[in-house]
Amino acid sequence: MGSSGDETMKALRFHGQRDLRFEDIPVPKVGKGQVKIRPAWVGICGSDLHEYLGGANLCPTTPHPITGETVPLTFGHEFSGTIEEVGYGVTDYKPGGRVAVQPIIYDGTCGACEENLHNCCWSNGFVGLSGWGGGLAEHIVLPTSTLYRLPDNVPLEIGALIEPLAVGWHAVKISPFKKGDAVLILGGGPIGISVILALKSKGADKIIVSEVSRKRQEFAKNFGADYVIDPTKEDVVKRCRELCDGQGVHVVFDCAGVQAALDKAIHATRARGTIVNIAIWEKACTITPNDLTFKERKYMGVATYQVGDFQEVIDAISSGSMKPHEMITGRIKLTEVEEKGFKALINDKDNQVKILVEVGGGT
């Protein structure tokens, strides 16, 4: 993405472990097939926190195969914004349009992309982690393929929740879940809540959440969990079987990535049930294949979201079947991101679901 001469803008840039800098960088120039966006609201994601605490891991330190960029990079991949300018050839978007950004970067040529599985691209990356700018800047230029229009009844701040909600939506969508199935969710953080909301919109009526934090247990109940288990006080396997006619749940969604929780979840799954992994694990885990084989259980991974998932989430919010507003537990300014955003999510994570950063703001 090119820059427009000497004009500069403010951006929050990631330079390395615990090294965020509020800097002046060139304003990007709009090219053919692109739009210039003023980010409105930006969510802080768990992957941002992992990079801040231990990176660079996801952010490239050698040129990314698609963007060609390396650290330092502008953060922010969960965001909405208002279109400021359109490039040559863009006819379906106009200045003033309100959009959510789908941040996957893909090459369009690999085997996965040829099957329309852009989320599984062999060279994939993310806006706000791999280059092409990020939401935590005053302006960003992106191809129109990343944009989804927001209906009039979906505010810009809710538009910043579309990305994490799409993760939960996609996981439920490609899992074998069907209405009437019993479900166990490991972890009551933002993605766990996204799964709850997706399940509720699809008619789930037996959602069990395993969560240690007392505050997150309350969040899970408020967002629609039918039962909440504290795994430090109750036997997850025994409780799930009690709630499911002695058989266990049909589907598990692992949003935690914790070995002890996974061990219990496998045995809490009924014969021919499925464990769906959404979590990004920080270290290798172990699975005993016999625990799957003897009960014909299945273990599958899901990666972010596919084409169509963003639009389906937007439609669900617009129709009222998904109500994510209470996920927002804090609103801060761009200049406050490190102290009131990152550090709050690290030191007070139990009381937070999603902190939004106001960049351009608006409704």
Image (spheres, grey):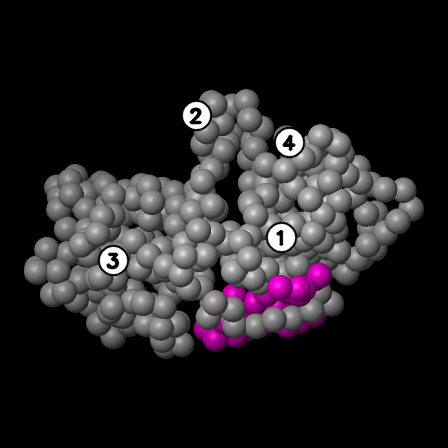
The tag earlier along the polypeptide, 4 or 3, is: 4
Q: Secondary structure at mark 1?
A: strand
Nearer the observer, disc 4 or disc 1? 1
Q: Which residue is mark 3?
A: 204
46 or 156, nearer to the observer: 156
Residue 52 placement: quadrant: bottom right
Q: CA distance from mark 3 to mark 1?
A: 32 Å
Q: CA distance from mark 4 to mark 3?
A: 40 Å
Could you classify mark 3 by the number of other residues whose Cα lies within 10 Å: few (under 14), some (14-19), or many (20 or more)? many
**Residue ID at (44%, 51%):** 315
Number of the label disc, if any, that sits on residue 66: 4
Can I make out residue 195 in this image? no
- Is 109 situated above or below 288? above
The tag earlier along the polypeptide, 2 or 4, is: 4
Q: Secondary structure at mark 2?
A: loop
Q: Amino acid at mark 1?
A: Arg
Percent position (x, y) of residue 352? 50, 71
**Residue ID at (15%, 43%):** 272
The tag earlier along the polypeptide, 2 or 1, is: 1
Q: Which residue is mark 2?
A: 115
357 or 40, nearer to the observer: 40
Q: Amino acid at mark 3?
A: Ala
**Residue ID at (55%, 40%):** 104
